Image (spheres, helix red, strand yellow):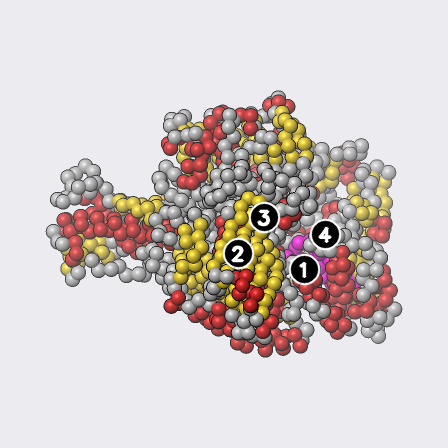
Amino acid sequence: MKPAPFDYAAPTSVQDALGLLAGNDGAKILAGGQSLIPLLNLRLAAPDLLIDLRRIPGLDGITRAGNELTIGATVRQRRAERDPAVREAAPLLTAALAEVGHPQIRSRGTIGGSIAHADPAAELPAVLVALDGRVIARGPGGERAIAAADFYRGFLTTALADDEILLAIVLPVAPPRTGAACVEVAQRAGDYAACGAVAQVTLDDAGGVSDARVALIGATDRPFRAHAVEQAIVGGESIAAAAGHAADGVEPIDDPRVPIAYRSHLAGVVTRRALEQARSRAT
Amino acid sequence: MSTHTIRLTVNGHEHVAEVPARLTLADFLRERLDLTATHLGCEHGVCGACTILLDGETARSCITLAAQADGSEIVTLEGVAGDGEELHPVQQAFWDRHGMQCGFCTPGIILSTIELLDEHPQPTREQIDEALGGHLCRCTGYVKIVEAVQEAAQAMSRTRP
Amino acid sequence: MTPTDGRIFGSPLKRKEDPRLLRGRGKYVSDIKLHGLLHAAVVRSPLPHAAIRGIDADPCLADPRCVAVLTAADFDEIPQLVCIDAEVTTLPFLQPALARDKVRYVGEPVAVVVAQDRYDAEDLLTLVEVDYDPLPAVVDPERALEADASIVHHETNLVDTLRYHTGDAAGTITNAPHVLRERFETQRYAGTPMETRGVIATWEDRSGAITMYSSTQVPNGVKTNLQIALDLPENGVRVVAPDLGGGFGVKLQIYPEEILLCRIAQKIKRPVKWIEDRWEHFVASTHGREQFHDVEVGYDDEGRILAIRDDCVTNTGAYLQSLTLVEPFIGVTMLTGPYRVEHFDATAKVVMTNKTPMNPFRGVGHVQAAFTMERIIDLVAADLGLDPVEVRLRNMITPDELPLNRKFGNVLAGTIVYDSGDYPTCLRRAAELAGHADFAAQREQARAEGRYIGMGFGCFVEETGLGPYESGTVRVEPSGKVVVLTGACSSGQGHATTLAQIAADELSVDMDDVQVLHGDTDLVRFGVGTYASRTAAVGGAAVRVAAGKAKERAAFIAGQLLEVDPVDLELRGGAFSVAGSPAASVSLAEVAAAVAPGSPLPEGVHDYGLEATDVFHPKTNTFAYGVHVATVEVDIETGVVKHLRHVVVNDSGRVINPLILEGQVQGGVALGVGGALLEEILYDDDGQPRNPNFMDYLVPGIENVSPEILVEHMEIPTPLNPDGIKGGGEGGAVGAPAAIANAVADAIRPARITATPLFPARVHEAISAAGLGATVEGSAR
């Protein structure tokens, strides 16, 4: 399976990259390529031009400023997974990264690539949505921030315009006494999960839950923020009871191997397990 | 379709080549450099047979473009044993423990094992599963692969300074 | 002559082939480079069923990158694939090498394009314009038998009906104290080697012949088929099988692409290569297993199986392949496995649908038979509240009943006669190794803690060591080196080592001095190839007999040289000497040199060279057997199954190399894990494959297979070949799915398990249906 013909460019500035993107419907951004190139090899996608971000400086930073952690688009997943600053500021991202594919994929895959690709079964989009992060994008008109809640529009579809490039993501730094977890149900590690959940729990001084973040992976055509669960927990319900709300408002995808009723059921199971793990890690 | 000049080091040798944009790194290694130990089992990044070391980390050459490897250092299985007769301890362990049958998945597994033992000289079973979880083998059932990894770890810890 | 000692035979020697492969110097077909090599890609049907109104290759030929296009129009008569074991059918179910008027499955070859490289060739595929007129497709075999079903070929989708019966099953069931009625389903899956298929065909000017390199398990058979397909004389084609990255049965027949690439090489007189990509492999290489058994089982209060009626349906896909009928044949005739069932009545319907064709792969019908029978035993045991091991023992054929003529047979296998073995001892030993006696208590304890573990048994008997024959040549060179030629062709099983062990054992030489050559029809004139667990049993026998003949001749020559009676000579360390007089000795090298051309032959010796050939025709096939015991844990909330531990007691007769056999069994178990839990080739109702890739077709990974697969060998020799070998390449794959399915059923009793694969949603459904899951969720608070 060889890809259809395309041109390739590796510009050295965002400006140049935008220039290549402008007015070219057949152009696609190439970051790690771990999601894109399989599609090209299978001839499920046939862009005219791949614009590789690898030579653009300034896109691979991990910086903490105040209460925010900014991660550049081309930061490799493996590097982010091992970075102590990330673990301290965004333990949910660290937990989720451990579940992304395999080490051989994470050495090349990027943070920005996974966020922008918008596969509903991917972990990083769920993290962005759970934490109310935002995406920094630049287009011909300038730079803008897109809130996570507005970013995912559907299957492989985001709010990024065709002529925009994702430059970085910004995540809120986790408060003290926060624990995080990512739980997926799959027959093989690294596969698309039948259903998964990312969960983050923050405890108050009395040991009660002051903040909870939950998003579902692979339940529907985009990450699903389980507000009902979060409200129930913060409202004092037990984790098990709160997890019962996991599928509230979700329209699950149907699949011969993962029927709707089963996926809805799993949503509750993974939510409960992720919350339990997150809570036990909140110290 | 555009072509690009790439400069890269493969198994210690420098190469300069003109490649079409869509040529994968795997095909560059196999067809242009005649380094055929890197195998193609799926070409969609799942089976791991195409695994190489790219700038020191294991990566899938079937879903990497040759153009993306400009400026990189690559190690394939052919670069592991060196020029002499002696096998690398990982290769030796796979021989001793019958960790290989048809040999098609083996090059990638050996490179991932080398990376694993570099970072975790005495790996736990969990760490072995993590490092090799992205390699499909249809012949061995994995049991003797794990034994080979563990034996290699022992052998290398004996000779470590 | 005194017998040689057996230290090489039976030793777990490291493999001779490994260093080269470990260094990355393997040569699989895709690694082979030839000067001027062109590359082919195959135009394949995107539809499961359609009439072809026309094929226009002109737009493709007009492209400057196109070197050639091959369509059905380029043949006067399109060659067809053969079906070796079709006994009764005369209807045209055979597959043409290229579609002309109809396509019958997604992936069926329609044309071949040739370019300078594979990238360009794939670009050119869309330029071949094929005018399809879609027809309705049928994918479900029972639907295909209905009166209004779309017909795949001609008149009916029922290719054949096989019937086997002994005694009076219907009557016995009517009078039986208990009757079980159940339907057991095995899914469609495939061998899926890590190396896909591939072909290089080249025209040799000097000989006016074609050389074809192919990733094939059967080079000699393919050569014969190519001669027929392309009307070539015997020396008109040479087939070479280089290193193979696995076969598992998927590579055991001639395929269209082999015929087509040879035809192209013949036409354009340039070498051309086609490497199957993974998507192609899922649609263009044969599938296996899809088979249902509707059974009625009569049994008594002691759990003795009195009678079985079996209505079996096999979904064979769109065309007959070389050995298509083996899957249904074995699926019913081997159903009762190691058990004594006097009254048996099975009907096996072979049904065509618009899916990729089916052909045997590792384990073939034994897998479905074992799954069905072993589930029956466990259900009977559960119904009566008896220990499933005890029920097995009550039904098992005992050693004194062997050899046992089962009275069934077919044109390929002859009559089924279980030749040798001790099934009850095997079962008892496996149960002991697995800790069966203590397990029930552990299971109940675990359940009290909210954990669901189970243990399951999978007993099987398997037809192995199949004929019709295999060839072996043993040649001693004047250097003292021994060359062995075999018609068995390796796809990773270590033949270069195991067959060398036989020759080295017989000739008392070092393993380093023996070289095994295979896979080249110019070297090996007669051969059948590797499948059906036959290499050690039949290929090994040919090597043993040939080596014995060479040794006998060598002994005679040595006797002449030493002026002693050959009867007084012993062969040790590669040299002949009189026992007790080591000083007077002559080495094998010296013996070979004595009969090398250029000098007069010793007295009484009439031919030059020290070489012997045997073409071993086993009288009938032998029957390996074994018992698998699997332990699993089921996540009661998600239905995910974890394979915890696996034990196999396996009788493959005498073992040449226990390390290699252990590897074969463990690999087979992993394939069994895939069959039990993960793998399924899925089609939608319109006949489109749903998961032709490794993302959605789940081959077991390292975490899916039990970290411990304990293999113990029983070695009850078969009388059917000199070394008493039964064959062990497939048993792992046969017993494992049954054992794992039974273990899952044990873990979640009383939930009912009747189909594989046991993917999480299916297990969860069984759990819910049995009312198990609810209690757990309640206690999660």
- Numbered tag placed on residue C762 in the rendering: 1
Residue C403 colored in magenta in the image: no
Q: Secondary structure at mark 2?
A: strand
Category of crowding for the residue at label 1, using alpha-carbon neighbours closer than 10 angstroms: few (below 14), some (14–19), many (at least 20): many
Alpha-carbon span between mark 3 and mark 4? 23 Å
Q: Chain of mark 4?
A: A
Tag 3 and tag 1 share a subunit: yes
Q: Chain of mark 2?
A: C
Instruction: Decide if residue C370 is on the left or right side of residue A63.
Output: left
Whether tag 1 and tag 4 are in contact, CB under 8 A, the answer is no
Q: Chain of mark 3?
A: C
- State the quadrant of the N terminus of chain A: top right
- Numbered tag placed on residue A217 in the rendering: none
Alpha-carbon span between mark 3 and mark 1? 22 Å
Q: Which residue corresponds to mark 4?
A: A255
Q: Chain of mark 1?
A: C
Please report the bounds of the magenta region as a residue range: A181-200
Which residue is located at x 47 percent, y 64 percent? C342
